[in-house]
Amino acid sequence: MTTTWSTREVSRLAGVSSRTLRHYDHIGLLRPTGTGAGGTRYYDRQQLLRLQHILVLRELGLGLPEIAEVLDGGTDVVETLHRHHRRLLAEAERLKTLAATVARTIAEHEGGIPVGATEMFDGFAGDPYAEEAVDRWGERARRAQQHAATWSGGEKQDFLDELREVNELLAGYLRGGAGPSEPQVQEAVTRHYKWVCRTWTPDRAAYVGLGRMYVEDERFTQNLDRVEPGLAAFLRDAIEVWAPAHLN
């Protein structure tokens, strides 16, 4: 008899939300093996392996359409996994260096040799996005960062999953030729604004400014356009339609 796992069990095993699993089913990325009484989805070992691959590729920064192409044979999955492995090794080396830095600092506090200025920050990976957010939006951004820092691992994952789903939804509308002002696009922007409000509540000017930053800052543009070419500008334009109608 084939062993299967329910949506709830897979969610717990993989650390993804049930909503994300439903979304993957909806877009054809991860179909369940079958559906039981009451509509419960079940997954077998092959689906679990596919989900593992999805999560690995997502860590690489690939969008869901790219992940589907890799898994369905359009891209070399082994080479993609090799790239991910190299990234993990590099991150492991950074953490090893950071651990050594902390150990030297502990030794200094216990009366050992002082840590040199050039060694004091070895292994740190700064977050320029967080710093720039504070520069741009001040105390509101700082409070948002402090609030997010209190989240559990599951809450953080749910936050990221929601963003990916909104981006994929908007990307689908863009691919289908919808304009920024069309109702379904504006509904997706409502969902995007609610996602933003999980950390802070921008007024009209701040939300429009956020949309423009997606285009003006090439790092944000690259992240969005990796999901679908032109998505950054599309989201900016959709926000500029939505904000005056909903915010003061």
Image (cartoon, grey):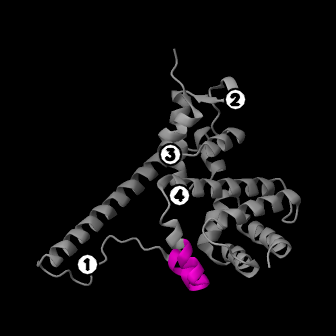
Left of 81 or right of it: where is 92? left
Give residue 203's quadrant in the image: bottom right
Q: Are marks 4 and 2 in contact (CB under 8 Å)?
A: no
Which comes before the other along the chain, label 4 or label 2? 2
Q: What amino acid does circle 3 point to?
A: Gly
> Hey, which residue is sitting farthest right in the picture?
182
Residue 50 shows in this picture: no
Q: Secondary structure at mark 4?
A: helix
Q: What amino acid does circle 1 point to?
A: Glu
For the record, the magenta segment spans 130-144
Q: Nearer the viewer, residue 176 or 152?
A: 152
Q: Which residue: 70% across, 54% down?
A: 168
Numbered tag placed on residue 119 in the rendering: 1
Which comes before the other along the chain, label 1 or label 4? 1
Cα distance between the residues tagged 2 and 3: 21 Å
Please say whether residue 241 is one of the residues in the magenta stretch. no
Give residue 177's quadrant in the image: bottom right
Cα distance between the residues tagged 1 and 3: 36 Å
Q: Secondary structure at mark 1?
A: loop
Q: Secondary structure at mark 2?
A: helix
In the picture of the structure, the residue carrying the numbered disc 4 is: 156
In the picture of the structure, the residue carrying the numbered disc 3 is: 15
Which comes before the other along the chain, label 1 or label 3? 3
Which comes before the other along the chain, label 3 or label 4? 3
In the picture of the structure, the residue carrying the numbered disc 2 is: 39
